[in-house]
């Protein structure tokens, strides 16, 4: 389930903090963890927007009683783009690479990447499953690959 | 007690100041701010001591803060704030200013946008517009791990791809927006990009984030724009033809990260537009000029759909005949917009809207300019404001 990437300039590795520890612990175990509302069981995307901390409330019922729960890891490709511009030397060997928004079976959208798929084969709506890329000894990040 | 007709404006724009724009180096945002306000006051025939309100559009500049008042030397203000709803802020500022004027809290309000993100020899990636690499804490670190830099580009490209997938929108259709605005820019002495553009040029421009070509994207600029808002009565005594603020609307659709929500293809423009038109007492067909927020070509297309100029998904076909370009049936972004003139967020469409409503557009002036719609859009299609400008205080 895990692959290791080696590049001359290392890619920026997320630094797990207390709030996000269950997510990153799950990633190391090979499980995609999402927030879920204890009141109404709605699954929630952990990040409502770029740079925001974890969400404090359920989007369906506004309960503040949220827990981390495993996702099925199954998703479809909601949209994707191809990054042609090089913003960071660490991605020099990757351009052009994709950035994807996937919609999990639980109805949650996540920004991620599609792995093991050439850019030409990407198609909105394609079935995906989660996979994890090891970035360091302690940190793995979820990506998605074509469902088998 | 005087009863106001609901469709009569309670405030008007009496002054407009636009500094030099674009690659103007060696000046601070505060410097541009001061000049923009000075020009706007001069335009209106007012003095700095007349100003009792200052509203600043929050942006990438660290100088867009409440204490900007001190460096500008403005004193005893009764209305001051830095406002932030990203690219939709302009409409929210005008609305706040108009309400303050209607209630007597302030009488002359300067609304301002100023920034200086470009430095000589510096690349745009060193400005605030593209993410710098770092090992970010928590889930915020994910996007850097994926290489999702310059998140506005990728966010809008994702939205566009979704629209293309659902409705078959094409690059040829988007090109008509970029090419049309470039044609308008050629008649705007302030525009940075005035070289003619063909559809072939558009297709030949490099991918920034596919499906966005370079010519789908706005320009980042140094400069400042200010407008002076005052009461209709006072505006009529001043130097310029008043531009009445007739209607306001806002809508922020919110959460983008679950199946039920789709601001990528269904923005807040629908609610905001209907609200603003209702307040102004007019309909879509009464609009003579559109100044639509155009961080990307796609923003214009989806905004037209959501305002109801065409059905959802038909924006591509709607723009394809060139109706937004000079000589077209629906003059849109008549100064070249942020794609071809200058990038001052919501103050780009606002500034051109004021020029058109006054009838001061020169070569590019729309023949009929009674009602002008100005839109603001921020986040990734997640914040929207609509403002209706008119040369009439109210319609009979
Ligand atoms: Zn709930």
Image (spheres, coloured by chain):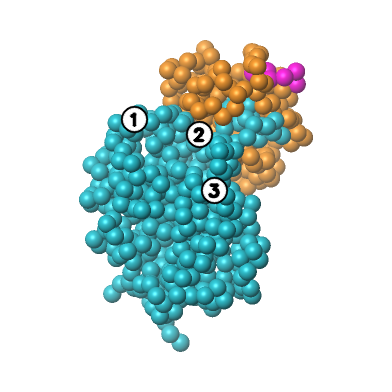
Chain colours: A orange, B cyan
Span highlighted in magenta in the image: A133-138
| Disc 1: residue Cβ within 8 A of ligand 1's nearest atom | no
Between B215 and B102, the one lying in front of the other is B215
The chain holding disc 3 is: B
Of labels 1 and 2, earlier in sequence is: 2
Q: Residues within 10 Å of mark 3 (few under 14, many from 20)?
A: some
**The magenta stretch spans residue A110:** no
Image position of B284 (left or right of B268): left
The residue where tag 1 is placed is B203
Residue displayed at 60% across by 27% down: A88
Please name whichever residue, A94 or A119, is drawn nearer the observer in this view of the structure. Answer: A94
Visible residue check, residue A4: yes
In which image quadrant can residue B63 be found? bottom right
Q: Mark 2 against mark 3, which lies toward the viewer?
A: 3
Task: Confirm whether residue B278 shows in the render.
Answer: no
Q: Report in which chain the residue with disc 1 lies.
A: B
Instruction: Confirm or reject: label 2 Cβ below 8 Å from ligand 1.
Output: no
- Farthest right residue in view: A18
Which percent across, then down, holds residue B121?
Answer: 56, 38
Q: Tell me the residue that label 2 is attached to.
A: B154
Identify the element where label 1 is drawn. Answer: helix
| Residue A120 versus residue B95 in the image, above or below | above
Location of mark 3 (residue): B25
* Vertical placement of residue A46 versus B88, above or below: above
Secondary structure beneath label 3: loop
């Amino acid at each position: 389930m895990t692959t290791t990437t080696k590049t001359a300039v290392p890619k920026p590795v997320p630094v797990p903090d207390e709030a996000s520890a269950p997510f990153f612990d799950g990633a190391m175990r090979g499980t995609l963890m999402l927030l879920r509302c204890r009141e109404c069981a709605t699954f929630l995307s952990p990040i409502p927007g770029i740079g925001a901390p974890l969400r404090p409330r359920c989007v369906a019922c506004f309960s503040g009683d949220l827990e981390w729960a495993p996702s099925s890891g199954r998703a479809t490709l909601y949209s994707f783009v191809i990054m042609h511009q090089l913003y960071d030397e660490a991605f020099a060997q990757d351009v052009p690479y994709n950035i994807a928004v996937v919609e999990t079976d639980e109805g949650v959208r996540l920004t991620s990447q599609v792995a093991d798929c050439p850019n030409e084969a990407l198609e909105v709506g394609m079935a995906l499953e989660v996979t994890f890329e090891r970035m360091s000894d302690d940190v793995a990040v979820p990506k998605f690959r074509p469902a088998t | 007690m005087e009863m106001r007709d609901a469709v009569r404006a309670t405030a008007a724009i009496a002054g407009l100041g636009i500094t030099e724009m674009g690659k103007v180096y060696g000046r601070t945002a505060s410097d541009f701010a001061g000049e923009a306000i000075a020009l706007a006051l001069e335009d209106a025939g007012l003095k700095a001591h007349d100003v009792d309100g200052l509203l600043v559009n929050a942006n990438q500049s660290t100088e867009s803060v409440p204490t900007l008042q001190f460096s500008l030397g403005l004193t005893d203000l009764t209305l001051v704030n830095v406002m932030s709803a990203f690219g939709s802020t302009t409409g929210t500022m005008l609305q706040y200013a108009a309400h303050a004027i209607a209630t007597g809290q302030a009488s002359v309000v300067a609304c301002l946008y100023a920034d200086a993100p470009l430095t000589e020899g510096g690349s745009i990636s060193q400005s605030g517009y593209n993410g710098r690499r770092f090992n970010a804490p928590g889930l915020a670190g994910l996007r850097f791990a994926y290489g999702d830099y310059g998140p506005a580009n990728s966010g809008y490209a994702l939205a566009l791809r979704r629209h293309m997938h659902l409705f078959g929108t094409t690059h040829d259709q988007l090109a008509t927006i970029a090419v049309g605005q470039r044609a308008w820019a050629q008649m705007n002495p302030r525009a940075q990009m005035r070289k003619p553009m063909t559809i072939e040029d558009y297709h030949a421009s490099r991918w920034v984030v596919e499906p966005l070509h370079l010519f789908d994207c706005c320009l980042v600029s140094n400069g400042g724009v200010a407008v002076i808002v005052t009461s209709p009565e006072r505006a009529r005594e001043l130097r310029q033809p008043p531009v009445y603020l007739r209607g306001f609307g806002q809508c922020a659709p919110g959460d983008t990260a679950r199946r039920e929500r789709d601001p990528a293809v269904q923005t807040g423009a629908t609610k905001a537009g209907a609200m603003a038109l209702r307040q102004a007492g007019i309909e879509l067909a009464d609009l003579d000029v559109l100044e639509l927020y155009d961080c990307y070509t796609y923003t214009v297309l989806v905004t037209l759909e959501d305002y109801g100029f065409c059905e959802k998904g038909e924006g591509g076909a709607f723009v394809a005949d060139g109706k937004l370009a000079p000589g077209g049936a629906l003059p849109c972004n008549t100064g070249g917009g942020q794609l071809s003139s200058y990038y001052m967020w919501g103050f780009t469409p606002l500034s051109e809207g004021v020029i058109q409503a006054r009838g001061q557009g020169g070569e590019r002036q729309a023949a009929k300019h009674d009602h002008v719609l100005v839109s603001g859009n921020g986040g990734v299609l997640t914040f929207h404001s609509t403002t209706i400008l008119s040369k009439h205080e109210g319609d009979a």
